[in-house]
């Protein structure tokens, strides 16, 4: 398992190489340049030329790339817009995004797994139909629209939760209050897919022989469901959650825009719009690393749940 | 059933014949519709011939699938809605009550009323007409992007699965790397680099989710590679290309179709998300995403402006998903969402 | 038991005091549409940076309340020599920067030289081009000598981008660091900048104009106007700006206070003077005739803007509204059709002509572009609307690559700022690549003379030629500045330039 982890982490090297080359290529393909974006509408040609020299934008591409890579790995990458260290800027924003992601994951799991189990156990009941329809709707509405609807409902009409912004860490009351709405809007997609998957995974397991044997032996219905069936159903559910994390990152960009959330997604989008090349570069590379690590964790949990899997 | 549809098609063809020459849009629509009608006729004929020649007891895999699908109510509902949406999309120029571009400055931001059934937007354009045209564009882009997406995903998956070893390793690792870049960021950066335009949008959207596609096709072709008939073909010296084309690809068709169907919904949502960030389909062309993003700025004043595009997106995504789920249940249970 | 009761009572008491203490702190939460890029005056471009910096920094002279006449601020008084070339400022004594440094003439010299220093690439350097020397005969006198007379010079000094910085602290920190930790003399001290989240300022108890009523100001960048409206309606914000007109009318119904003044921000449509067929006067006239501006402009801007007829805003020297209004081309489809047909016959306008109109991403300019596209479609011209990000669009505009564009401008109430950079051939803001000797001469002369009557005449000549003879631009609208505040906020009025000034000689915003 340690070997496996190390090998997975070693894969980060080619990954970073690939992602960095790709991001750099896109950045250089884009029309316009960071100096113009920074100096705005009144800048003169001379001023722009000076700024270009300041940020080494007048160097040949391969030198710029090498410089960026060296800076990235030595933690010296400087944002043009924020005039600060990229690593510290991203790390400053990362908690907001990770906490939001964590809370929406939590909401999704807490709601969807029980609902999925009940739907499977009471197959074709009213509850089953109702929850499956809601889940279907959940994946069919754009994230940004659920966001604004939640704001209107909970902040403007009911006035129980703040409309937008970051209120502090997840574990503070103010922080939690601010996080509920964006987390809820972000969790819809995950909730919908997890509910459906839990249901189908449970259905598959429930009909298997060993469950029937257990029931025949007199094990209580609840124990059978929770101990025997659910444990096995957990495997596909974990995989799905792992797969969905990438999608959540994507959804986070939209959610963060709607809720004026100071997260990494919005940071990266703004960096692209502002042509803050070092920041885009650093952001995307760091996000790729975070993604790989989260997926590795999911895989390890997966192996923990399913002893049949050997890491080779 | 098919015959009724065919007759309806013929009737519509005759009905709209008079309007063909209005502009290029109508001409294209009309010819597409005519081609579809012809294909329908061909299908009816072949089915009839087959029924005559074949004995009733024998069933092919597709028959079995169809029977299974037919019993799935929600899948059938999804299928009918998809068909209906296709009709709307293709016939859009003939059925819109107004020109979706025309601004009526005397009728700004109206709710539903007798003249404009679903009201107008803040520039006096008919919401119903715009929604119909937007459906046409969303379906068109969705289908094209998904086709491109399936092509790329399938070929990469096939190659990886069939050749195995280093090829497999290389392709799959590369796709995993690709997947690690948050998609929407990549889309934004690519749109910024390539410029906005329908073609670029299709390209960018079709580059997402290749990994999931390739993984499943890879698994299938890995299994098929070991099948006896493939081994036999190899021994006979049939070139790899032929084997892939004749023996492996046809057996992967079912999962490809299922995944493509399930993908369309997501593609349309992605385009809507890009429109929200101002990178989707550019004005003045009507698009569901920008209609919704615009409508939510008028949520209080005129709620129909958001309800209409929202409902249409819901309808498209929902029906494709229901249909795709049904297909999956009928064809293949290995693919999970 | 009694002990517990006492402890509980004490606890209760302390919490009440604490809570009361917290409630007594007056916090003003302001929503802004975009995060400023910089807070270092030398680097600031754009209204968002100026708006925040205006509360941290002070300038030599002030235009904060009356936008037309310069009022003393850091400078107690000043004299201008007869030839208009030498400005002598007497500085106010006893002013301290937020870090405790004394304010002296050397800080003024340092700041202005930093702006003019090419290395800093300051966006406002151009306004100081005519400066020849800056001398400081003593600690509280600054003498600035210009190469040529320059009428809008006081405006340049009064702009927030000329906020005076402490020399020693800035040099110690470096320009870039100072950008993220600015120190000024203004009513509020910089406290915290959490990117994309908030900028926090705290009260400067030693402010020489007045002690601010508010203890803490939080500027929150909120990118979506609909979210900002929701925040205001739910009480999450005290002040909101740049809201959508439809939301503003709703908030008025909900009892929030809405204040609006005619603004100094314009929207216009421009043609490219160097590219066919846009270079042909008849094409521009035909487009003018083809679009029902009188209906479209109120439709798009609602209560948020008034139709513009000239570049120079109403009320600014040389505005000439009546003449311009009379010579504006009316909506006339027949005339447009005839002109397009004529151009087609001459081969200037190709059959099935296609071009792209560019606009930034804000909803209103996008709508203007959409209207152009929709209307010209009826004359067989296909117009694509492209709304690239600023960093992409701006270089294209400057290079003169845009055939047609919907853009805007915002400035101070002086005709020079509204015209010079737009119409002079060598200016990079001349997106239309317009070049007319008569206009150029009038504008160049306009900035060097100080007699208002003569100046007004020159700007009138220039605008008449460029706009209602050559029709190189179509002025669309002057936007109003509207701010929405909760009823608790007192004393805050919108400024035409969209600044948010909290404490000036005449106002001291408070929150009840």
Image (tube, rainbow, N blue to C red):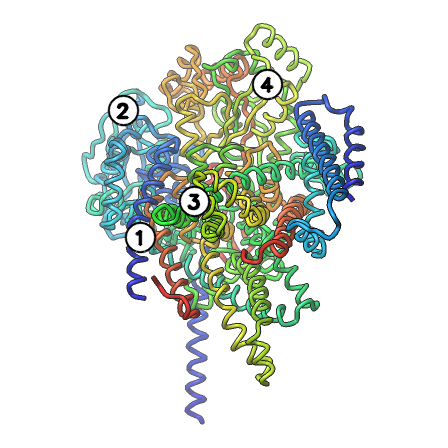
Q: Position of C178 compared to A218: left or right?
A: left
Residue C373 placement (x, y as % from top left)? 59, 26
Question: What residue sits right under mark 4 in the picture?
Answer: C287
Work out how far the residue at label 4 is from the one at label 1, CA to CA, in angstroms.
57 Å
Q: Does residue C265 appear in the picture of this structure?
A: no
Asked if badges 4 and 1 are on one and the same chain, I answer no
Question: What residue sits right under mark 1 in the picture?
Answer: A12
Q: Which sits in the foreground, B315 or B50?
A: B50
Q: Which sits in the foreground, B154 or A166?
A: B154
Work out how far the residue at label 4 is from the one at label 3, CA to CA, in angstroms.
72 Å
Work out how far the residue at label 4 is from the one at label 2, CA to CA, in angstroms.
44 Å
**Secondary structure of residue under mark 4:** helix
Number of the front mark, 2 or 3? 3
Question: Pointer 1 and pointer 3: residues touching (CB < 8 Å)?
Answer: no
Q: Which chain carries label 1?
A: A
Question: What residue sits right under mark 2 in the picture?
Answer: C146
Question: Pointer 4 and pointer 3: residues touching (CB < 8 Å)?
Answer: no
Residue occupying the point 69% across, 30% down? B35
Question: What residue sits right under mark 3 in the picture?
Answer: B235
């Amino acid at each position: 398992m340690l070997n496996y982890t190390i090998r997975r982490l070693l894969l980060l090297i080619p990954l970073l190489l690939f992602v960095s080359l790709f991001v750099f290529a896109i950045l250089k393909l884009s029309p316009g340049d960071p100096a113009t974006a920074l100096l705005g509408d009144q800048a003169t040609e001379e001023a722009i030329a000076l700024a270009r020299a300041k940020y080494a934008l007048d160097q040949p591409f391969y030198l710029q790339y090498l410089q960026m890579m060296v800076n990235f790995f030595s933690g010296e990458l400087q944002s043009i817009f924020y005039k600060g260290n990229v690593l510290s800027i991203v790390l400053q924003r990362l908690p907001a995004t990770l906490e939001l992601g964590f809370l929406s994951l939590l909401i999704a799991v807490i709601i969807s797994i029980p609902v999925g189990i009940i739907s499977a156990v009471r197959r074709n009941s009213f509850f089953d139909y109702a929850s499956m329809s809601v889940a279907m709707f959940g994946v069919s509405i754009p994230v940004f629209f659920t966001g604004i609807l939640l704001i209107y409902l909970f902040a403007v009409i009911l006035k129980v939760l703040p409309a937008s912004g970051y209120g502090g860490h997840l574990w503070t009351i103010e922080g939690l209050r601010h996080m509920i709405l964006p987390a809820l809007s972000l969790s819809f997609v995950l909730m919908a897919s997890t509910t459906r998957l839990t249901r189908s995974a449970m259905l598959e397991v429930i009909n298997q022989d060993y469950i029937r044997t257990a029931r025949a032996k007199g094990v209580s219905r609840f124990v059978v469901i929770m101990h025997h069936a659910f444990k096995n159903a957990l495997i596909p559910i974990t995989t799905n959650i792992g797969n969905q994390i990438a999608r959540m990152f994507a959804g986070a960009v939209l959610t963060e825009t709607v809720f004026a959330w100071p997260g990494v997604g919005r940071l990266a989008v703004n960096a692209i719009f502002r042509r803050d090349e070092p920041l885009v570069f650093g952001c995307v590379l760091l996000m790729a690393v975070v993604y790989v690590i989260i997926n590795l964790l999911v895989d390890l949990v997966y192996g923990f749940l399913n002893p049949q899997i050997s890491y080779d | 059933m098919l015959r009724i549809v065919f007759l309806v098609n013929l009737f519509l063809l005759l009905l709209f014949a008079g309007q063909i020459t209005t502009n290029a849009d109508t001409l294209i629509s009309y010819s597409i519709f005519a081609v579809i009608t012809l294909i329908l006729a061909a299908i009816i004929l072949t089915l009839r011939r087959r029924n005559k020649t074949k004995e009733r007891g024998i069933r092919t895999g597709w028959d079995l699938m169809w029977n299974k699908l037919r019993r799935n109510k929600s899948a059938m509902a999804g299928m009918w809605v998809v068909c209906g949406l296709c009709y709307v999309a293709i016939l859009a120029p003939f059925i819109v009550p107004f020109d979706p571009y025309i601004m009526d400055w005397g009728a700004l931001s109206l709710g539903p009323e007798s003249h404009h059934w679903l009201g107008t937007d803040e520039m006096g354009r008919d919401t119903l007409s715009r929604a119909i045209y937007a459906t046409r564009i969303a379906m068109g882009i969705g289908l094209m992007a998904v086709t491109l997406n399936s092509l790329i995903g399938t070929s990469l998956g096939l190659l990886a699965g069939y050749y195995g070893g280093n090829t497999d390793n290389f392709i799959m690792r590369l796709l995993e790397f690709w997947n690690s870049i948050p998609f929407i960021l990549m889309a934004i950066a690519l749109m910024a680099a390539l410029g906005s335009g329908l073609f670029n949008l299709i390209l960018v959207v079709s580059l997402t989710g290749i990994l999931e596609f390739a993984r499943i096709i890879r698994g299938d072709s890995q299994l098929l590679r070991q099948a006896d008939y493939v081994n036999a073909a190899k021994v006979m010296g049939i070139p790899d290309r032929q084997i892939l084309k004749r023996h492996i690809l046809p057996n992967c068709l079912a999962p490809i179709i299922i995944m493509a169907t399930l993908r369309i919904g997501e593609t349309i949502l992605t385009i809507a998300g890009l429109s929200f960030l101002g990178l989707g389909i550019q004005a003045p062309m009507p698009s569901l995403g920008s209609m919704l993003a615009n409508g939510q700025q008028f949520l209080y004043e005129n709620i129909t402006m958001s309800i209409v595009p929202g409902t249409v997106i819901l309808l498209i995504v929902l029906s494709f998903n229901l249909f795709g789920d049904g297909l999956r249940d009928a064809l293949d249970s290995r693919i999970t969402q | 038991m009694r002990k517990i009761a006492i402890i509980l009572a004490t606890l209760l008491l302390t919490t009440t005091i604490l809570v009361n203490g917290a409630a007594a702190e007056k916090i003003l939460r302001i929503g802004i549409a975009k995060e400023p890029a910089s807070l270092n005056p030398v680097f600031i471009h754009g209204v968002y940076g100026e708006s925040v910096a205006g509360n941290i920094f002070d300038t030599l002279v002030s235009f904060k309340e009356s936008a037309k006449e310069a009022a003393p601020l850091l400078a107690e008084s000043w004299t201008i020599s007869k030839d208009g070339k030498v400005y002598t400022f007497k500085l106010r004594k006893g002013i301290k920067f937020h870090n405790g440094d004394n304010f002296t003439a050397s800080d003024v010299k340092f700041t202005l030289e930093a702006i003019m220093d090419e290395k800093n690439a300051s966006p406002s350097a151009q306004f100081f081009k005519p400066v020849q020397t800056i001398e400081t005969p003593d600690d509280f006198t600054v003498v600035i000598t210009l190469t040529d007379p320059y009428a809008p010079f006081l405006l340049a000094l009064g702009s927030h981008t000329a906020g005076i910085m402490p020399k020693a602290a800035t040099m110690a920190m470096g320009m870039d660091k100072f950008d993220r930790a600015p120190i000024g003399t203004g009513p509020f001290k910089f406290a915290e900048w959490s990117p994309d989240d908030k900028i926090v300022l705290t009260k400067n108890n030693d402010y020489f104009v007045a002690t601010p009523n508010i203890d803490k100001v939080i500027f929150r960048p909120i990118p979506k106007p609909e979210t900002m409206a929701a925040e205001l309606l739910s009480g999450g914000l005290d002040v909101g700006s740049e809201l959508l007109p439809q939301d503003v009318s709703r908030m008025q119904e909900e009892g929030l206070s809405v204040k609006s003044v005619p603004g100094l921000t314009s929207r216009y449509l421009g043609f490219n003077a160097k590219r066919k067929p846009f270079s042909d006067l008849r094409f521009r006239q035909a487009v003018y005739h083809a679009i029902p501006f009188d209906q479209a402009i109120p439709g798009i801007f609602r209560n948020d803007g008034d139709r513009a007829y000239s570049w120079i805003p109403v009320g600014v020297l040389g505005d000439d509204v009546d003449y311009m209004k009379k010579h504006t081309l009316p909506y006339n489809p027949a005339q447009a059709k005839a002109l397009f047909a004529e151009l087609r016959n001459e081969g200037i306008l190709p059959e099935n002509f296609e071009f792209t109109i560019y606009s930034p991403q804000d909803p209103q300019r996008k709508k203007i572009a959409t209207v152009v596209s929709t209307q010209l479609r009826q004359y067989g011209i296909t117009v694509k609307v492209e709304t690239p990000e600023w960093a992409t669009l701006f270089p294209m505009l400057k290079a003169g690559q845009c055939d047609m564009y919907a853009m805007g401008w915002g400035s101070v109430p002086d005709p020079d700022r509204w015209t010079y950079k737009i119409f002079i051939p060598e200016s990079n803001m001349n997106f239309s690549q317009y070049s007319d000797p008569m206009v150029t001469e009038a504008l160049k002369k306009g900035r060097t003379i100080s007699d208002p009557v003569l100046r007004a005449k020159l700007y009138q000549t220039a605008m008449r030629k460029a706009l209602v003879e050559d029709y190189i631009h179509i002025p669309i609208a002057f936007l109003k500045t509207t701010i929405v505040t909760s009823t608790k906020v007192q004393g805050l009025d919108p400024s035409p330039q969209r600044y948010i000034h909290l404490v000036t000689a005449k106002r001291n915003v408070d929150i009840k």
